Image (spheres, rainbow, N blue to C red):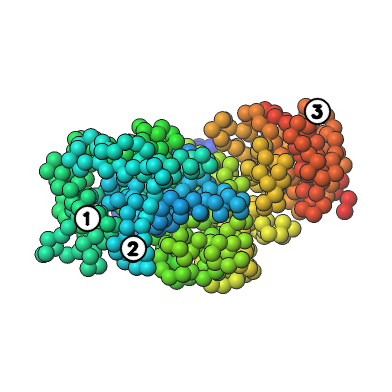
Amino acid sequence: MICQSFAIIIESSCELINQHTHKIAMLQKTAIKMKALVNIMFNNRWKCLGTLCRCKPLKVIVILFLVCGFTGSPHSSVFAAKKAAAARKKMRRSPLPPRWAFGHIKSKDEFKGRLDILADVDWMEKNDIPCQIIHIDAAWSVGHNLFEFANAKVLHNILHPEIVGTVYDFSAPGENPYNADPNDILCRPTTPPPHVGQNLIDTLHGKGIKVTVWMTDRINMGTLGEDKKHHRGHPYGIGQFEGQGPREAALFKFAESQGFLRGELKDWHRGWGKRVDYNNPQALAWWHRMMDKVLDMGVDGFVLDGGAVLDYTTTTFNHLRAKKGDQAIMMSRSSREVAEVTLLTWAIDTKNDFSDKGIKYALEQVIKSSRVSTPYVTGTQSPRGPAPTEAFVCREVQFNAFCPTQFTFCYGDLSNPWDNGKTATKVFKYYTRLHNELIPYIYCAAILAHRTGEPIIRPAPGDLEYKFGGEFLVAPIYRDEMTRRVSFPAGDWIDYWDENKVYREGQEIEYDAPLDHIPLFVRAGAIIPMEVRKNWTGHGTENSAGALTLQIYPQNSEKCWFYEDCGDTLLRCTKKNDYLTPGDIHFELEGPARKYVLRFKTFISPQKVITGSAGVLPRRQAETDLTPDQAAWCYDEATRMTIIRFPETESEVLDLHISADKK
């Protein structure tokens, strides 16, 4: 590439000076000679440059080439842009998850059964906390990878010794254990339906909540020989249910006899076993029938432990897509190798404290993961360690809310966010609601990532800062502190918590961040699509439900696309003044038919609002007076916003007439 660039510059220089006829012959001959020597010169570049610079006609060419980056480190924005575009072309494209996957996932490392899960769901419902997915982690099945919901007593548990003797019961009255015969290659139940777990799945689906369960790529042998090592002094790893050992041993024996397993016995954190042979078609067909035990009951997908292995991830993804279509969901470890065959990813397991293995570790890994072709990455919440502090819970919730999917993964009974004090509860409510209101914005960025490779989380110049999509700058607090150094990238950045403050490119500030605030900034000129159902975060009211809300911060001329499953919408906003200076605003939209609520930051009230379809719009006193069936507007003095409501429309043009002299 360097050599190519050198030759191009030489030829371009010759063409530019071609006008001077007395130099034509000399320059053309020079270009030919230089092209022939390019490869040799690159390997001996500094020595060659010293010699070349003694030749006056070539000094300009050599200097030009040095400025453009002869050493392979491009300094011009043109070279940088081309390099970034080339990198995106080479990125592996992740498949697009369903829209609901970008909402809120609630999980624990160990739910104790159906009632434990429904208690969490009940609390979230009563407190207006959106939840799109319940993920049931490892301790859900009667044995690891038996794919049968448990109704069994805990015999031992290294992580939670206090629950030994507890029955993990995922059953409802009238449900039977699945009890597949381990020697039945078709994996059929030995009892009639309904089977344990069916009521739980149906109940959650009835509430609009999807269900995922944990799986891994191996089968435990159930017992160990005396000469074999085992995990932490116990043959069953972290935990064991009553009857688990014999069930796993019988399945292992059958799979081994059929040639369905491969490799050596290995110790892992939940036992001792072998991997399924994913390259054996008969083994794979049998393994998929094992998975179908719960997929046919309605489970929507899997979270893959150890899921950065290509054969394991690929075959699981393909089977889920075959069973569930584009509504399948799967989460795996973040890795470049599996980017094309995974949906959601989590970057790392962390400690629930402010050490370097806490939020800081997750933040580093999330930013890193977004660079390696896994755009739909999320952190985890409080997965490891003793009871977290309230400050930690607040900061972890805030960080997770500004990941593509908000994953609330709690450690036992210690770290449900609402069990950690009033401030933590308040923070959890606000940020989970805000994340859900931003799903149109996040999903739009996800579609862009799917189409172009542009990640949702984009590194920013400051210390562990990132851009969330193109319009938010996020600087999570990862220490037990109330301030944070923030550096600002290109553009003007509005303080989310005080929209009268704007920071400029290159500024560095010490930002005050009380426990309920994350340092968060919106790009001046941004148009943020939102889905507002209630007056949760100050971005609308109950009347906003059913419409697409556009939060608009006018500055100069902006054009952007809003991507959705139903089609793309072109949005244009023009204002001659900067963000803080009131002035006339022109706005256009064109796309699929939908209802709109447009929220412009105007600072003062317009004299009038004129649309292309309805002429001068009527003014209402308050936002609550705006109804879905009529185009009208109001000005809110408290937020200094002009709010315009439209009934269903495919295209619209409007002008806000604002006198800059009015205070």
Q: With 91 as the anchor, is 497 left or right in this view? A: right
* Residue drawn at point x = 35 percent, y = 41 percent: 195
Query: In the image, what residue type sits under mark 1?
Result: Gly
Check disc 2 and report the residue beneath it. 165
Alpha carbons under labels 3 and 1: distance apart: 72 Å
Please state the horizontal and vertical placement of residue 466, each as a whole percent of the image. 53, 56
Query: In the image, what residue type sits under mark 2?
Result: Gly
Disc number for residue 289: none
Q: Is residue 373 in sight in this rendering?
A: no
Disc number for residue 614: 3
Tell me the element at label 2: loop
Please state the horizontal and vertical placement of residue 435, each as a whole percent of the image. 58, 50
Tell me the element at label 1: helix
* Residue drawn at point x = 63 percent, y = 30 percent: 591
Check disc 1 and report the residue beneath it. 245
Hey, which quadrant is residue 226 in on the image?
bottom left
Tell me the element at label 3: loop
Alpha carbons under labels 1 and 2: distance apart: 16 Å
Query: In the image, what residue type sits under mark 3?
Result: Ala
